[in-house]
Image: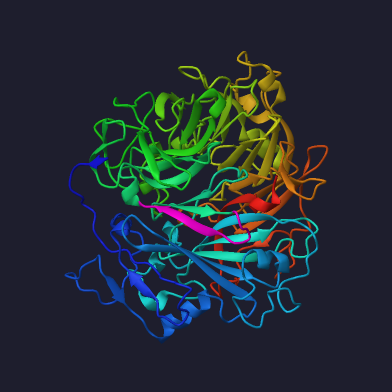
């Protein structure tokens, strides 16, 4: 792997150290070259004050003091005798140490589980060896958990309208509680119905030393034996976690910017049957100029968080195996693809969503936007055409050497967008494949375009994509009192049911502006059985205004099964593919009876959500019902509120839950 050209990026990025082995040790802020690109883009620069320009940015800066030591004690949970901290560390490719620290609530975990984690002698006096002083009585239930990847909500989470309140420099006095800067973390929530701790956060697992990762996606679904792959959008880091001993998590590897030189801004992951993964890196190469990929070809990029993005093959531990260019060597100009700064060969290659059919040797990615100018920058994007109208199919017959096969521009629909990026094909955020051997199709949705597309055969040399559903139809049913216009409805998570009968879609809604009342937020469930039964001879095509409002006229068009009102702005979701068998163990199932969703996108875009995580039951009639038993342990309200003051790792205040997975310990699943 070679990157040519000199970097124009400069600045300092610092990180918060929280080693559990020294709870009274002051924090250290380490300025790292990993974050230089972020600083150049106007993101946070955590540094000591003052810092002299001649200082070596690669050396640690000691800001140890009583206040920082107190914060370190806080994050370790030492103010609560029911919290046990365990830290796992790995050495990054840059020679720095990275870690996860568990903050396990022993009062919520069965004693036998604590013993299995080897915690019997960790904290003297807690009686974790089996006495009544530590752990909860063993109720005989094996536990299923919802693992939520969440970011600390702090002073840096500002949209364009709030820029006047953004500090120029983040100094040590801004590290701390509430609106100040704290650690990002994985929340481990008991999702076992009937458990005494159902809906409670039994562990928070903080990441270090990097802060302000902007936690984003993990893989779409977890299978037995899988590691978790989790991306930091702003830090350009992929964290790989061992879930085998849940509710404890361990860090196995960190994939750093220097490990993926031709791509940045990791977004989503798809784990293959061998435990390895593919990751979409939405942004361009780490530095502007030519970048040579693993296949020996070169593309010209406009730098970090720009274009073109790439597809990365990762081994089961998250190490880079192969970097594949997401754009062909020729310009993409079937529809307008803007790049800022402009590239000689225009490209829409900014892959976001990703799913694969290993049995078909095919992987699909969908392009969302050039992230530097939308996600990372809270100022409104200067061009509607930074939102992408493209879906890409890949040949993965040689899984460690994926090859771009086709670039498909989604067709425009009959609606006229109020702005250019609300035309139907714009901002193709997510894609989802069908699952059963008799089906070869895939779906894609457009966040700003408000449309759902379908291609019946993704193995074709040039898949044929058609619009099969317009969110105008769902908006009309969800709230008849408002203008149903589907553009800008902010659809996110898109997922076929594992039996290929239904399609789930999270819709955050369009925010009110001026005379526009906005659009509703909900979880949409569509019946897609007739569409898939048509094979490659599908007739459905939303090509009239009437069909955008009333649904497709053709008999095989998707039909609304249910719309669940979801106030707060749902962006992401997950299927619960685990069920408890008569043998007392969990087993994987295609008959999904529960889903989860979260109300958060990216604060700097202004689409912040209310930071709740909810569980939804799927009834025998396929109707959706918010689980009333999944309640916040502090407020008693339905759904878990991440805008709370206290966590197992301390009083760090509100957090931003982006993605989640249903997971169980290896010993509890067969």
Q: Nearer the viewer, residue 96 or 293?
A: 96
Q: Nearer the viewer, residue 45 or 369?
A: 45
Instruction: Say if the magenta span includes residue 410.
Output: no
- Which quadrant: the N terminus? top left
In the picture, residue 309 is in which quadrant? top left
Q: Position of residue 235 (x, y in %)?
A: 39, 56
Q: Which residues are magenta?
A: 244-256
Answer whether residue 657 is visible to the viewer in this image.
yes
Q: Position of residue 299 (x, y in %)?
A: 27, 33
In the picture, residue 60 is in which quadrant? bottom left
Instruction: Look at 55% across and 29% down and name the residue there.
Output: 357
| Left or right side of 584 for 412 | left
In the picture, residue 308 is in which quadrant? top left
Answer whether residue 607 is visible to the viewer in this image.
no
Q: Nearer the viewer, residue 98 or 65?
A: 98
Instruction: Look at 66% across and 39% down and name the residue there.
Output: 475
Q: Up-down: is 374 above or below 632?
A: above
Instruction: Say if the magenta span includes residue 247.
Output: yes
Q: Residue furthest bottom?
A: 66
Instruction: Look at 59% across and 22% down and name the residue there.
Output: 440
| Left or right side of 170 for 1 | left
Q: Position of residue 285 (x, y in %)?
A: 30, 43
Q: Nearer the viewer, residue 346 or 141?
A: 141
- Which quadrant: the C terminus? top right
Q: Position of residue 13 (x, y in %)?
A: 32, 63
């Amino acid at each position: 792997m070679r990157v040519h050209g000199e970097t124009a990026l400069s600045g300092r990025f610092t990180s918060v150290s929280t080693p559990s082995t020294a709870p009274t040790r002051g924090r250290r802020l380490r300025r790292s070259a990993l974050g230089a690109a972020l600083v150049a883009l106007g993101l946070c620069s955590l540094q000591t004050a003052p810092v002299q320009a001649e200082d070596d940015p690669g050396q640690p800066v000691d800001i140890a003091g009583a206040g920082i030591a107190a914060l370190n004690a806080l994050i370790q949970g030492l103010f609560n005798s029911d919290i046990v901290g365990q830290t796992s560390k790995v050495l990054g490719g840059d020679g720095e140490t990275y870690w996860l620290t568990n903050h396990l609530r022993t009062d919520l975990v069965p004693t036998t589980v604590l013993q299995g984690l080897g915690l019997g002698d960790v904290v003297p006096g807690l009686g974790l060896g089996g006495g009544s002083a530590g752990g909860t009585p063993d109720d005989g239930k094996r536990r299923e958990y919802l693992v939520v990847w969440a970011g600390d909500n702090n002073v840096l989470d500002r949209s364009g309208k709030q820029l006047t309140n953004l500090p120029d420099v983040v100094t040590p006095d801004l590290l701390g509680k509430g609106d100040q800067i704290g650690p990002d973390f994985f929340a481990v929530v008991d999702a076992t119905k009937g458990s005494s701790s159902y809906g409670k956060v039994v562990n928070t697992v903080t990441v270090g030393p990097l802060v302000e990762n902007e936690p984003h996606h993990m893989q779409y679904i977890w299978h037995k034996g899988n590691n978790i792959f989790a991306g930091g959008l702003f830090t350009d880091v992929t964290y790989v976690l061992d879930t085998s001993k849940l509710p404890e998590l361990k860090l196995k590897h960190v994939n750093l910017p220097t490990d993926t030189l031709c791509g940045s801004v990791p977004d989503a992951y798809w784990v293959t049957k061998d435990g390895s993964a593919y990751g979409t890196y939405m942004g361009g190469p780490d530095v502007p100029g030519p970048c040579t990929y693993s296949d020996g070809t070169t593309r010209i990029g406009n730098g970090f968080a720009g274009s073109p993005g790439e597809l990365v093959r990762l081994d089961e531990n998250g190490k880079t195996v192969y970097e594949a260019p997401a754009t062909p060597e020729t310009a993409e100009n079937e529809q307008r693809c803007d790049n800022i700064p402009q590239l000689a060969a225009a490209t829409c290659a900014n892959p976001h969503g990703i799913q694969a059919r290993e049995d078909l040797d095919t992987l699909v990615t969908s392009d969302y936007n050039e992230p530097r100018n939308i996600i990372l920058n809270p100022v409104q994007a200067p061009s509607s055409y930074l939102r992408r109208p493209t879906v890409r199919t890949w040949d993965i017959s040689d899984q460690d050497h994926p090859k771009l096969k086709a670039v498909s521009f989604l067709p425009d629909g009959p609606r006229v967008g109020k702005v250019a990026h609300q035309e139907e094909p714009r901002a193709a955020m997510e894609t989802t494949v069908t699952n059963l051997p008799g089906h070869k199709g895939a779906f894609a949705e457009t966040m700003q375009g408000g449309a759902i597309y379908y291609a019946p055969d993704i193995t074709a040399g040039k898949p044929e994509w058609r619009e099969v559903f317009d969110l105008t139809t769902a908006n009309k049913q969800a709230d008849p009192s408002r203008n149903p216009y589907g553009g800008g409805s902010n659809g996110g998570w898109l997922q076929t049911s594992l039996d290929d009968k239904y399609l789930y879609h999270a819709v955050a809604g369009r925010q009110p502006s001026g005379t526009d009342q906005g659009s509703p937020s909900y979880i949409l469930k569509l019946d897609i059985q007739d569409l898939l039964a048509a094979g490659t001879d599908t007739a459905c095509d939303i090509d009239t205004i009437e069909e955008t409002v009333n649904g497709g006229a053709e008999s095989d068009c998707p039909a609304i099964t249910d719309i669940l009102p979801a106030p707060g702005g749902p962006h992401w979701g997950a299927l619960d593919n685990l069920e408890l068998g008569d043998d007392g163990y969990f087993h994987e199932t295609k008959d999904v009876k529960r889903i989860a969703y979260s109300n958060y996108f990216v604060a700097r875009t202004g689409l912040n959500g209310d930071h709740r995580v909810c569980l939804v039951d799927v009834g025998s009639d396929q109707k959706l019902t918010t689980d009333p038993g999944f309640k916040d342990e502090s407020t008693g309200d339905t759904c878990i509120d991440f805008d709370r003051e206290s966590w197992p790792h301390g009083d760090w205040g509100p957090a931003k839950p982006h993605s989640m997975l249903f997971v169980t310990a290896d010993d509890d699943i067969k």
